[in-house]
Amino acid sequence: MTAKTPPRTYRVKSFGCQMNVYDGERMAELLATRGITPAPEGEDADLVVLNTCHIREKAAEKVYSDIGRLVKAGKAAGREPMIAVAGCVAQAEGEEIMARAPAVSMVVGPQAYHRLPEMLDKAVKGERATDTDMPPIAKFDALPERRKIGPTAFLTVQEGCDKFCTYCVVPYTRGAEISRPYSDLVAEAHKLVEAGAREITLLGQNVSAWSGEDTKGHKVGLAGLIRDLARIDGLKRIRYTTSHPADMDDALIAAHGEIDKLMPYLHLPVQSGNDRVLKAMNRSHTAESYLRLLERFRAARPDLALSGDFIVGFPGETEAEFADTLALVDAVGYAQAYSFKYSPRPGTPAATMDGQVPKDVMDDRLQRLQALLNRDQHAFNEGSVGKTCQVLIERKGKHANQWLGKSPWLQSVWFDGDYTIGDLVEVELLEAGPNSLAGRIIEPVIA
Ligand code: SAH
Ligand code: SF4
Ligand code: F3S
């Protein structure tokens, strides 16, 4: 490869989960330390970082077609964009990407992206670089300070997963579970609030497994961390995602009843409502134990909104087993949920299991499941009409004077008025649509 002009502008495109969004922000901050600025909206960037996800079918093919599109657009404009592939596809298929896509200058895994600036130096010299190492914790120490951000911010507190659900690539792409140290997280949360955050969502592939030691040397879990972060003055709201049913402890349940700043929302993936399927998935819960756990959360916080993840068509799933998932959905009444068709991921045990379910059966099951979930989401939104709640304004709406914010239950709420992004306002919920609610301001701005 020949030497390249140092990039002046960048674009980071993040796919997949919120942890990738967080990583994307941190990569942008790293590039900014090199004086590289975000490419203006609608303009091509000199450097494009594809921050990829490996969880869905055809994830790798999508990356190759994105690369192809970038090269083609560059050619048409008489330029050659520098391309970096980051994220979980980079981790899983780094060498193949280098071999198959000569236009790619850098491949960097989710645990190594702090080394992006050095890789960039090499790329400018015309050397292609791959880094998919998994150093235990070095990344976070090497990242620059948080810069200015919006009213809601992500904070990765835990990474990796030791659960090895038989369908899932995450333990391979993100590595073993690690918890970031308590004091680093408290410091980063302060920085986020100073930079404008009023809400922080604590992130982890398995966030409820976070553990650490507080400043007095006492062992603390996620609930203890939330309790301490809630003491930060300008911070108004705390959320966390994603949890695994196996790591939900009494302290976290109690925290939902005791800490006002902890929002009444819980995303707790179940995947299936059938115990045989759950066992084959290597999930450690049963449908019954999951339902009992939710009951305890609801006892602590009766208005808790629930969310979950579902997979339909796991290998061997029969119609009767799928019906158990529908029954579980009926029993829970989710406010919101994500549902997926099973996708065999290379290298995972389920990919070679007998009884792969035909595509049309999966399509049909997904449709039926989503019809139920949509019904419940709508019912949840309808049930909120007439309530008054605080809404954190996240952005301007489509019409003049219109604003969009989130309710405590993570519903999108629209209303009119003259406000600023980041304002917390008291809103009466007037009308429910399938995905959002219309509201009316009761109390303008709450400090
Ligand atoms: N750590 C989280 C979720 C990680 S992945 C948890 O376990 O709760 C996000 C969701 O993607 C999973 O909850 C699951 O529903 C879905 N998913 C993961 N692997 C999948 C696969 N091979 N096929 C279909 N859906 C999958
Ligand atoms: Fe994947 Fe299971 Fe870990 Fe979630 S808990 S990241 S689904 S292996
Ligand atoms: Fe995807 Fe990796 Fe997140 S596979 S869901 S980006 S952890």
Image (spheres, rainbow, N blue to C red):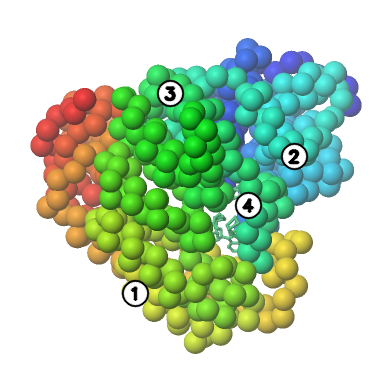
- Decide: is 282 above or below 76: below
Q: CA distance from mark 3 to mark 4?
A: 27 Å
The circle on residue 134 is: 2
The picture places residue 107, in percent across and down from the top left corner, at 76, 36
Q: CA distance from mark 3 to mark 1?
A: 41 Å
Q: Are marks 3 and 1 in contact (CB under 8 Å)?
A: no
The circle on residue 161 is: 4
The nearer-to-camera label among 2 and 1 is 2
- Pick whichever, 349 or 125, lies toward us: 349
- Mark 2 secondary-structure assignment: loop
The circle on residue 149 is: none
- Mark 3 secondary-structure assignment: helix
The residue carrying pointer 3 sits among few (fewer than 14), some (14 to 19) or many (20 or more) residues within 10 Å by Cα, namely some
Q: Are marks 2 and 1 in contact (CB under 8 Å)?
A: no
Q: Amino acid at mark 3?
A: His
Q: Amino acid at mark 1?
A: Asp
Residue drawn at x 33%, y 59% is 297
In the rendered image, the residue lying farthest to the top is 35
Cβ of mark 4 under 8 Å from ligand 2: the answer is yes
Q: Which residue is disc 1 drawn over?
A: 330
